[in-house]
Amino acid sequence: MIHYSNLEFILKHGLYTKNSRMKDPEYINIGDIQLIEQRQNFHVRIDPPGGDLGDYIPFYFGGHSPMLLNIKTGYRGIRKRPQDELIYIVCRIKDIVAQCPAWCFTDGHAKNKLTEFYNDIKDLTHVDWEVVCTQFWGNDEANMDRMRRKQAEFLVKDCVPVSCVAGIIVKTADREAYVKTILSRLSIEIPIYVDSKNNYFYP
């Protein structure tokens, strides 16, 4: 998930990490800036691919993330933004595996001590798909681990090429028109989905 202002650079050059010399110099961060900085030197607990979280482009497996809710509400001092400013970049796991040499994934929030890291696609069974795909992820007495598991991540080291972008999800028709203008200007064909039923964004 990105700020819409970052889209054109990504569609020209691909997705790069904050540490890359190829990064967008005008990239707009969203979410918890302090957490973003903390992730830079947090060790990835599986090797290969090894390294730190700052070496990776992170993807959630589904929508309605806690991060998105925090951005929507401004919780914990996070800069509040309307959801229409945010765009989902959709990639298929099979395309990442085929085109990106180094990747891994987790069964929960990457910085949580309980979280396990995996580097084999067969281990996707460890992701709690029911929780990943739900809009209601708060912990309760029946399940005190739901929020961690909701934030399972697929992590791609160094770069994700434009050829891996399989779709773009926006919240409104106005944002769809904005994306169409960029795609037309760059002569790129990528499906755009308007989330009118709030399958990914919050109501």
Image (cartoon, rainbow, N blue to C red):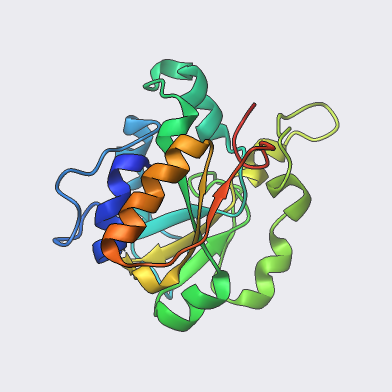
- Out of 37 and 23, give the one closest to the viewer: 23
| Residue at 48% across, 30% down | 83
Q: Position of residue 61 (x, y in %)?
A: 60, 54
Report the residue that reaches farthest toward the right: 142
Q: Position of residue 53 (x, y in %)?
A: 37, 54
Can see residue 17?
A: no
Residue 25 horizontal side relative to residue 167, left or right: left
Report the residue that reaches farthest toward the bottom: 98
Can see residue 147?
A: yes
Quick check: 24 above or below 155? above
Q: Position of residue 129 (x, y in %)?
A: 74, 54
The quadrant of the rendering that contains the C terminus is: top right
Residue 111 horizontal side relative to residue 10, left or right: right
| Residue at 24% across, 55% down | 9
| Residue at 30% across, 38% down | 29
Residue 168 horizontal side relative to residue 183, left or right: right
Residue 77 horizontal side relative to residue 170, left or right: left
Q: Position of residue 114 (x, y in %)?
A: 61, 48
**Quarter holding residue 158:** bottom left
**Number of marks present in the image shown:** 0
| Residue at 26% across, 38% down | 28
- Out of 28 and 32, give the one closest to the viewer: 28
